[in-house]
Structures are given as C-alpha cells and as structure tokens.
Amino acid sequence: MDQIQERIIGDFALFDDWMDKYNYLIELGSALQPIDPEQRTERYAINGCQSRVWLVARQDDQGRVWFTADSDAIITKGIISLLVEVLNGRTPREILDTDLYFIDRIGLRENLSPTRANGLAAMVKQMKMYALAFDAKKVES
C-alpha cells in the first residue's frame, strides 16, 4: 500500500497548482469503472457526502476486499478512485491498520471545501467499516 501511496504522491507532485490537480482528479474519476446501476441505491450510498457516492465491497475467497465506487460529482469520483486504488485487494486487517498518509501529503484535505473534506472522511470511514465487518465475520467463522 505504501508503494501505491508514494506513487500517488509523486503523480500529484508533477502539478504546480491545485487547478491542475483538480483536473487530474477529474481524469482519475473518469477512468473509474462505474458500479452497476442497480447498486446506485441508498443501501450503498455513503452518508456524510454532499454529492452522491456509492460504495460496494466484496470479499474474495482469499479474504481480500474489493471495492467498486461511483459518484455523481466528478471531483468526488476522482477522490474515491484514489481510495479504491490504495485499498483494493487488501485484507480487512490491512485496510483497518493502514495510515492513508497520501491524503495529507498531496494536500488534498486542505484544498477541499469543508463539505468535500467531510465527504472524504465519510468515504474513508465507510471503507474501514466494510473492512471491520469482514474482519468480524472471519472471527465468527
């Protein structure tokens, strides 16, 4: 996960101003595979985001968690795509234990509006809640 975070930090370092970084986020969001239309429901909606964000998680036979996500806002879609990139294919414990330091290192949190920053926190929280649920299910088995 650290390698992916370091690559993201390096990618964002290529841009001098935040308008270019926002454009890059838009590009990342447009490359994110959309979720199935039937998953764009309240069940998968993330509460706390100003725009609509849907997050679906599944766990494979090896115990790794895979996320798919979508948003109706282009910058938000780019933000969730970064989180998916870092956390996809990890075990629940890895997701729970990871420090998503790239968020602060690229200056994302400080360059978002307060409502978008709250949305970012809600996205991270929801991804960790899925991991916690998968981890608890493993303990029960």
Image (cartoon, rainbow, N blue to C red):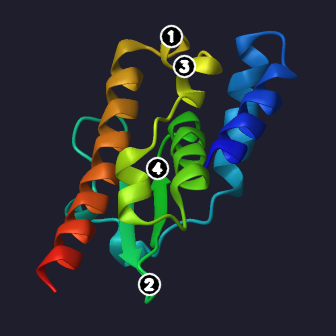
Label 4 vs label 1, nearer the camera: 1
| Secondary structure under the numbered disc 2 in the rendered image | loop
Left or right of residue 57, residue 1 in this image: right
**Image location of residue 50, percent across then percent down:** 32, 32
Say which residue appears at 42% left-offset and 73% top-offset: 37
Disc 3 to disc 4, how far (Cα)? Answer: 22 Å
Disc 1 to disc 2, how far (Cα)? Answer: 35 Å
Seen from the viewer's position, the closer of residues 134 and 116 is 134
Disc 3 or 4, which lies upstream in sequence? 4
Label 3 vs label 4, nearer the camera: 3
Q: Which residue lies furthest to the right in this view?
A: 14
Disc 3 or 2, which lies upstream in sequence? 2
| Secondary structure under the numbered disc 3 in the rendered image | helix
Q: Mark 1 points at which residue?
A: 110
Say which residue appears at 23% left-offset and 77% top-offset: 138
Q: In this view, does 117 lie above or below 41?
A: above
Disc 1 to disc 3, how far (Cα)? Answer: 8 Å
Q: Mark 2 points at which residue?
A: 60
As shown in the figure, which amino acid type bears the numbered disc 4? Ser
* Residues under numbered marks 1 and 3 in contact, where contact means CB atoms less than 8 Å apart: yes
* Residues under numbered marks 4 and 2 in contact, where contact means CB atoms less than 8 Å apart: no
**Circle 2: is it few (<14), some (14-19), or many (20+) Cα within 10 Å?**
few
Disc 4 or 1, which lies upstream in sequence? 4
**Circle 1: is it few (<14), some (14-19), or many (20+) Cα within 10 Å?**
few
Seen from the viewer's position, the closer of residues 22 and 130 is 130
Left or right of residue 1, residue 92 in this image: left
Q: Is residue 85 above or below residue 22?
A: below
Label 4 vs label 2, nearer the camera: 2
Q: Name the residue under label 4.
A: 71
**Image location of residue 121, percent across then percent down:** 34, 31
As shown in the figure, which amino acid type bears the numbered disc 3? Asp
Say which residue appears at 45% left-offset and 43% top-offset: 98
